[in-house]
Image: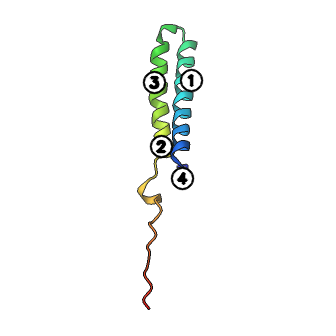
Amino acid sequence: MLGPLPKLYRFLVALTATMIFAVGGAWAAFMLPYPILLSAGASVGLGVGAACAYLLLHQSASSAQPHRVRRRRLH
């Protein structure tokens, strides 16, 4: 929903979202009484981050910009 972005910015947004959620999931798992679940929390965070990155960068068909039509001038 961020609109059309250049490839570099799309990559940075996706990377940032997945890393924030992966670190957040690992931190949440670390704060639970069983710290052995750290890798599971990071995995869940990574999955949620990937889904959020997809939703941030996905452009739905209804919001897609129409293509420009080039018209030839008749003399």
Q: Which mark is residue 44?
A: 3
Nearer-N-terminus badge (4/2): 4
Badges 4 and 3: C-beta atoms under 8 Å apart?
A: no
How much space separates mark 2 and mark 1, taking CA atoms? 18 Å
SS at mark 2 in the image: helix
Nearer-N-terminus badge (4/3): 4
Q: Amino acid at mark 1?
A: Gly
Q: Which mark is residue 24?
A: 1
- On the question of residue 24 being in view, the answer is yes
Q: Nearer the viewer, mark 4 or mark 1?
A: 4
How much space separates mark 4 and mark 2, taking CA atoms? 11 Å
Badge 2 is on which residue?
55
Q: How busy is the neighbourhood of tag 1: few (under 14 within 10 Å), some, or many (20 plus)?
A: some
Badge 4 is on which residue?
3
How much space separates mark 4 and mark 1, taking CA atoms? 26 Å
Counting from the top left corner in percent of width and height, residue 38 is at 50, 13
SS at mark 4 in the image: loop
Residue in front for this viewpoint, 55 or 71: 71
Q: Nearer the viewer, mark 4 or mark 2?
A: 4
Would you say 40 lies left or right of 28 here?
Answer: left
For the image, the number of numbered tags is: 4
The quadrant in which residue 30 appears is top right
Counting from the top left corner in percent of width and height, residue 43 is at 45, 22
Q: Amino acid at mark 4?
A: Gly
When the figure is inspected, residue 11 is found, relative to residue 40, above or below; the finding is below
How much space separates mark 4 and mark 3, taking CA atoms? 27 Å
